[in-house]
Image (spheres, grey):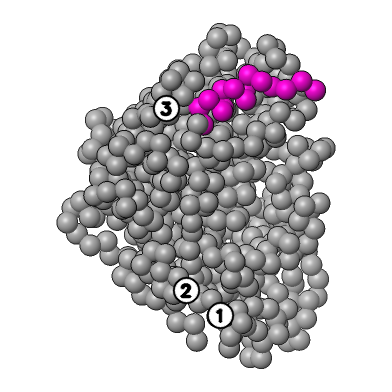
Amino acid sequence: MKKNILIIAVLLGALVSCTKNFERINTDPNNISRGQIQPSNVIEPVLIYGSNEMIGETWSLANEISQVTAAVSSNIREEHRYNLNNGNFAGRWNAYYEWAILADHMYNLALAQGDENYQAIGLTMKVYYMQGITDLFGGIAYKEGMKADKGIVQPVIESQHDVYEDMFADLEKANSLYNTQKPLPSKEKDAMYKGDINKWRKFTNTLYLRLLNRVSGRNDSFSPTIQERMAKIFNDPTTYPVFVSNEDNAHVHFSGATQYYSNKFRPLDYPSDSNFSGEHHICDQFLGMLILDKDTEKVDPRLRIWCKQRLGKTSGIPEYSWFGTISGCSSGYASGHRSDYLTNDAWLNYDALCRDVADNIIMDYDELLFIKAEAALKGWISGNAKDYYEQAIAANCKKWNAWGEFAKAYTIDPATRKVISQDPVNITDADIAALIADPKIAWDGTEQRLAEQKWLSLFWVAGWEMYHQMRRTGYPEIKIGKGVVEKNATGGKFCARMPYPIIAISNNNAHYLEEIKRMGGSSTDDNLMTLPVWWSGEAIAKDAGSPWPHAFRKLEYRDEN
């Protein structure tokens, strides 16, 4: 197989501040020869490798920081204590930039060859990955950041406002480029929509709404406002088609035929529950949002697809009960007076999530409905917020029902606490109706209820969407663990962002200093995990001279007893 020298040159030239291993891109089964590369050769790694890297981030880091899981049995994995280092920051930075650059390369190849659809797809995926960078770190070099091959090695670092305007413009352009009458060449390499341009166009505009929703707290900072832009999209479905059902969901699909065409969490690499979830125990606060009645063990039906109870060995705790761990716990928690509790902690559901052919979830119809519910609640668009909210929960349940086939959930005898059987989970319409009517879930007209249910619906969406949602809305309310104070990586505070990698600042100090000052710092020494990004609820409250009224900023630390 000949090496794909062209892609290597572009990527290495653009990532002068990063050290990456591009072997994966050069060993895919496409047999690309120098001078013969097509945009269709690029779409596979952008979707397959890129989404596998993003779901890996969800599992290993984002869930830990978002208090979904915690590596409580390990004092090496300390992400849930926010004890992160430059390796963590550089790894995230490099991963997102790698795939954004490759998506940009797809666009440029398509531009040179006059293929409008691959241009649109390239722009869309570039925005998808670049949003991941700016949301984690702050302002970035969007316009100049991928032009090292043109001699720009110290690019201007744009404010987040300007980065979002750039991304809006790219998505507007992508939407205008799609030609639904023109077949997508080599459509079999499109692991998401198999060349369905109508669905790609819907994804572009639905992603646009995700971006608008992210910065909606800064509505009046934009012209047109975020409200006006949202209304334009929702009011003109002919010009801006968006998702209309779960059939439109943006999922990367895998055949499982080879490692290349398999989900990251294939059983060959993760052969058991302990390999998959041994260091990622389910947190009690996450469980608490899904347990509707502890006494009767009535739960949200999605819980039995997402998680699995364990036998347990702790006196006083029923076997196979829903029991969670403490995020941010002290380093002595696993070896101290509650170490036996670790045997009770629920784990991720290996059978449902760890499969060769499991989809990687990029964005779903239910997220669009939650965006509509929020916009309607604010009075930005017509329609009933309650209706959109309930439709969103229903759509999410129906999506997960397809995964329930593989769940092997426990049926427990309540008297003996023994496992009667392990069965698939089938979420019926009656189950969904009961869930929506439950007092813990039923629409109450508050931003908190909406934000919390949206947060839950983002479970296992590739990347850091649950974490972004927390920082934007302040929900769900969480408490800081004693280990966060013990390690003191954030001064006992919640992790508000990822700091820029050291090498990025070293190579472009003056421009990064400008952005750090825009975020409220005074020097590059303030490039800290506690410096909030511009669109976050904390930064907005700070600019307004008001405190941000949420528990994980009031420093209400968890009790481990």
Q: Is residue 12 magenta?
A: yes
The residue singled out by tag 1 in the image is 333
What secondary structure is found at the residue carrying circle 1? loop
Residue 354 at x, y percent in the picture: 73, 54
Left or right for 340, reference 433: right
Q: Tell me if residue 322 comes above or below residue 174 in the rendering.
A: below
Type of amino acid under label 1: Tyr
Q: In front: 57, or 196? A: 57
**Residue that numbered label 2 is attached to:** 483
Quarter of the view holding residue 47: top right
Amino acid on which the number 2 mark rests in the picture: Gly
Instruction: Determine the CA span between mark 3 and mark 2.
Output: 40 Å
Query: Counting residues from the N terminus, which is met first, the one under dot 3 or under dot 1?
Result: 3
Residue appearing at x 31%, y 70% in the figure: 554
Q: Residue at x 35, y 51 (%)?
A: 527
Residue designated by label 3: 153
Give the spatial CA distance, label 3 vs label 1. Answer: 47 Å
Q: Residues within 10 Å of mark 1 (few under 14, many from 20)?
A: many
- Residue at 32% across / 52% down in the picture? 525
Q: Is residue 407 visible?
A: no
Secondary structure, magenta segment, majority class: helix
Residue positioned most to the left: 545
Please state the extent of the stretch shown in magenta in the rendering. 1-15
Whether 337 is drawn above or below 320: the answer is below
Q: Secondary structure at mark 2?
A: helix
> Which comes before the other along the chain, label 3 or label 2?
3
Nearer the N terminus, badge 2 or badge 1? 1
